[in-house]
Image: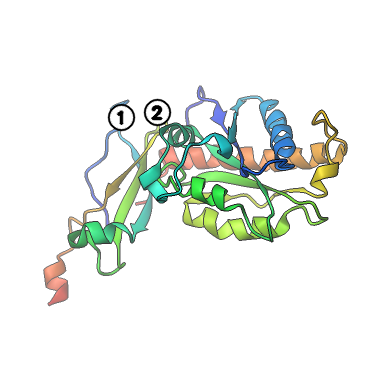
Amino acid sequence: MTNNKKLLCPDCGVEMNHHAMKIDYEAASDAPEAIDTDFGGVLEEAHTCPKCGQTQLRRSVDETDDKQTRAS
Amino acid sequence: MSATRPLFIPVILGTTRQGRASESVAKFVLAETAKREGVETELIDIRRIPLTTEDAGEAIKDSQFAATMARADALIIVTPEYNHGYPGMLKHVLDTNLKEYIHKAVGICGVSAGGFGGTRVIENMLPVMRELGLVTIFWDGNFSGAHKLFDANGQLLDEAYIKRTDKFLKELIWMAKTLRHGRENISLE
């Protein structure tokens, strides 16, 4: 599961590298709609800028997964 | 990997107690780290990080500490062993960040009054490091008999620690370089 849209560094404007995924269990209470039921929490992607080294997290969006189809 | 950016490897002094022997250890490790070409470092004394105990985690993030962690390529944590565990205040500080740590190297220096050099606190720290996204090296700093290791001026009395710390830093720097390259260039997908 990943968001295919590339993240740009807010400072450098260059394309960041997606190098890690993290399950955020605590975010689930704030955003129940974002819970990935396969993992039991909200999936987040870590992206790092190859120019300045800063890391950004963003919520992962599965652009290919059809939850309704899978649930049925 | 950017060849122009030096590695930044701060040293975290992980106790707030009065009379802490870990302070001399942290200053020694800081001085050894500062000798390395292409490495910048600084001492982070958790006593100086203004955190409330009314809450915990990212809700009480200190902006200066977070910025330092974001800039870091690796961390050196100097922690005493208190009742076989790590200081609660150290955990309180570390828990205030997450994204700042992901896929960064960490080396742990255990400090103890007894003869085991903080091995038990290091073992206790490992699962915490992993959950924070940090990557541990397999060389540790083990500082035994901490109150007898330095003179009144903070000068090291046992030179074996210089060689031991050299091995520790070599591995940490290798891991820091490797992980920086990975974070910036190697895609998960």
**Relative to B119, B55 lies left or right:** left
Q: Is residue B20 above or below residue A61?
A: above
Task: Classify 10 Å Cα crowding around label 1: few (below 14), some (14-19), many (20 and above).
Answer: some
The one nearer the camera, A64 or B123, is B123
Is residue B154 left or right of B42 when viewed as pictured?
A: right
Contact flag, marks 2 and 1 (Cβ < 8 Å): yes
- Give the SS element for disc 1: loop
**Number of marks drawn:** 2
Q: Nearer the viewer, residue B29 or A22?
A: B29
Q: Chain of mark 1?
A: A
Measured Cα–Cα span from mark 2 to mark 1: 7 Å
Task: Measuring from the top left, give residue B30's x and y in whole percent.
Answer: 68, 32
Give percent across and percent down for residue B112.
Answer: 76, 51
Q: Which mark is residue A14?
A: 1
- Check the image and report above or below for B174 versus B33: below
Residue B170 occupies quadrant:
top right
Task: Name the residue at 54% across, 41% down.
Answer: B178
Asked which colour scheme the image uses, the reply is rainbow
Depth order, front residue of B4/A45: A45
Q: Amino acid at mark 1?
A: Val
Residue wearing tag 2:
A51
Q: Does the image show residue A19?
A: no
- The residue shown at (87%, 36%) is B157
Tell me which residue sits at (47%, 42%) in the image.
B182
Amino acid type, residue under disc 2 in the picture: Lys
Q: Earlier in the sequence, mark 2 or mark 1?
A: 1
Question: Farthest residue toward the bottom?
Answer: A72
Is A15 left or right of B112, judged from the image as shown?
Answer: left
